Amino acid sequence: MKKILMFAITAIASTTLQAQYSGQVPTNLGGASQNAAAGAVISNFLGPVNEAYQKRREIDLDKFQGSPYTSNTFAPTVLKYNDEVVGSIYYRYNALNEEIEIKKTASEEEAYQALVKDKEISLLINSKPLSFKTFVTDKKATINGYLSLIEKGSQYDLYERTLVKFTEGQPAQNSFIAAVPSRFTKFTEFYFQKTGVNRIDQIPQKNNKLLKLVDDSKKEDLKIFLKENNLNIKSKQDLIKVFEYLNS
């Protein structure tokens, strides 16, 4: 924390200019001077939300099916930098743009800002960290995005990625065919990282493909475990059981 506060002191001059658009975020740190310093640190993590704040305020989500957000309301959370608590904020995750929107209160009138995409930053969601990472999809594409840690294991870490896709609606063709509204569709992907390996890979949704990704020493035992327990890794709960087994 001392390193963070020292950084904040040197950053106050520059964040004064930023405050016009980024604002200050209150923290749960004790003491007025510490609150001011931590607030300055959080200011450095803020920025415009794709310069589209006003446009987003004018969007009526009730006209669409689904939502670009995992939750339309802002929820309280703890912001951490390099595993050290910086302060408390309110957040909302835009899974369409893979962007975290934050502000200092839950007030609908308060403008929100975007959290900087820094791999040292994490938010605690249900006591689990949500953070920006680099990972490899099942199509061998290396991309960046937000992953939520499901299980921290002795041999494997299990992550979840929440995504939203937008599909444009279609007007009614005639009186017999109803219009199709535009919609946001949410889906999830799962990823894993082996201890000591600097790579995060997507988990395929088929049991036999997962078997190809684990260590040779575990393949046969895992195959038996999947069969005896009638597990299908398309199910999140079954996938968690698999990784609990791999980490046991």
Image (cartoon, grey):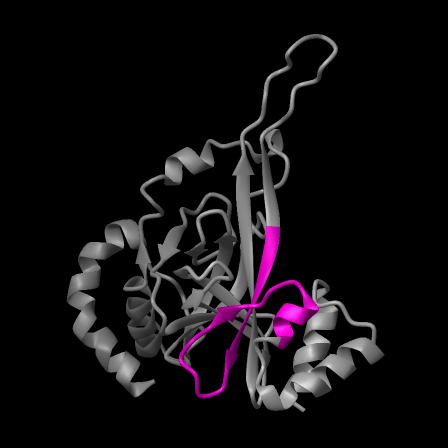
Residue drawn where x is 23% and y is 77% of the image: 7
What residue is rendered at 83% in x and 72% in y?
230
Q: Picture coordinates of residue 158 (x, y %)?
A: 58, 75
Provide residue 15's location: percent of width, then percent of height.
21, 62
| Residue drawn where x is 59% and y is 75% of the image | 212
Residue 232 visible: yes
Examine the image and state in which quarter residue 116 appears. bottom left
Q: Can you tell which quarter of the image residue 175 is in?
A: top right
In terms of depth relative to the viewer, which is nearer, 88 or 248? 248
In-image side of 2 versus 27 (left or right): left
**Residue 107 part of the magenta segment:** no
Residue closest to the eye, 61 or 162: 162
Magenta region: 187-211
Which residue appears at 16% of the width and 63% of the height?
Answer: 14
Residue 236 left/right relative to 152: right
Viewer-closest of 15 and 222: 222
